Image (spheres, grey):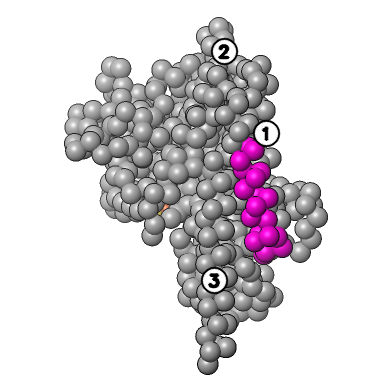
Amino acid sequence: MMLDLTTKEIKKRSALRVNPLKTCQPVGAMYAALGVHRCMPHSHGSQGCCSFHRMYLTRHFKEPAIASSSSFTEGASVFGGGSNIKTSVKNIFDIYNPDIIAVHTTCLSETIGDDLNSYIHDMVIPTGKIVVHASTPSYVGSHITGYGNMVSGFIKYLAKKSGVSNGKLAILPGFVNPGDMREMKMILSLMDADFIMLPDTSGVLDAPMTGAYEMYPSGGTKISDIVSIGDCKLTLAIGELAMENAGNELKRKCGVMYKTLPLPIGIEATDAFIMAISESTQSNVAHELEEQRGQLVDIMLDSHPYFSNKSVAIYGDPDSVLGLSTLCLELGMIPKYMLTGTTGEAFNTKAQELLAKFGIEDCVAKSSSDLFELHQLIKTNSVDLMIGGTHGKFIARAEDIPLVRAGFPIIDRYVHSYMPLIGYKGAMRLIELMLNALMDRQDRDCEDEDMEMVM
Ligand code: SF4
């Protein structure tokens, strides 16, 4: 839907969001729960919420996203969902036999005030099985908030401090694809770092085709590792806006100090990630990583004429937008719009710090935004390139701007979730995608000019 509003009228909107740059908290909670081995995510609310959230994840990852529902009807809405959750937990363990059920709430169960702490405390849980929960009301925050809340929930229920350090790093990856988690693990292994990653959706939402359906694939963080995460020597919360609360929760519960890092997208942020590992492990940077960095610098120099001073609009999740903008700035591009739908001043502050560092003054950087606003801004002052999820394609098409799909959700393309955006390799891939988009446009413009000359 496109209305012809003036900038003043856009500013007046305070409640209405049109094509929001975010989705429900439970989507993030479900994704985090899928990153735990043999875990069944459980949606405490109506079936519609659960179906929508599963569909959202399945369309992005092209993999079945399992989850169960408390299946609220009118009765539960009036009298509370206590009996629903108790029956659900019994049925799920009887029928699907997970090791752990991760319950997240929805708008309805939060509004009626269901007390999951006491429900879980009072229910009969089979020996050796576990139930955890996180509050994820969708009328605050976004899927990023829900993701962080579920990771905190796992820590709150399960992490233990034994008093003996396991010498490992706790890695809390932000809301990224399984391909990114694999790349983080590859970098950690090259640096000889011992670590526990929570959650880890690699091997779950990018599991290979074996010919047989496996409800619980081999990937995911083991429950024993979540318990042991309380004995780690340091937490790296990767994705400052998504993971700081989870890092803080581990510090509060088990005294593990934490360091927040930006998503390692681009040279500087990847350097920071590698140096944080190096400082913790006291190991030198692996030759392979130095080689990758050198290759990336070479590629950036070669492609600089195509990127220099090109304007770009970046939209999506807060940490991803900051990371993608950093790479664009490192390439000599000018971010004109940096928009996220997730609420919070922290994004605005970090965006302004980043822009100031590169001397950019006239970029609109905003949280709580939507695609409607992005379209209005682009109509006023267009850009050379757009970077973000699938839903921006209607703006790209209407305004004839090349679009690079990066972030969440990407529902009209394949393979993206297997490939990293983080690390030096991820930056190389992003540069290739961006360069192809810009050069395709340049080729097309040249062809149009040739046609005009012939005519
Ligand atoms: S009711 Fe809340 S949780 Fe359910 S789909 Fe709607 S916004 Fe999301």
Residue denoted by label 3: 443
**Residue 444 colored magenta?**
no
Q: Residue 272, labelled with which disc?
A: 1
The mark tally for this picture is: 3
Image: 31 above or below 163: below
Amino acid residing under circle 3: Asp
Taking the spot 49% from the left edge, 39% from the top edge, the residue there is 180
Taking the spot 46% from the left edge, 63% from the top edge, the residue there is 391
Numbered disc 1: secondary structure: helix
Density class for disc 1 (Cα within 10 Å; few <14, some 14-19, many ≥20) is some
Mark 2 touches mark 3? (CB < 8 Å): no
Of all residues shown, which one is farthest toward the front?
Answer: 454
Q: Residue 167, labelled with which disc?
A: 2
Per the model, the C-alpha gap separating discs 2 and 1 is: 21 Å
Per the model, the C-alpha gap separating discs 2 and 3 is: 54 Å
Density class for disc 3 (Cα within 10 Å; few <14, some 14-19, many ≥20) is few
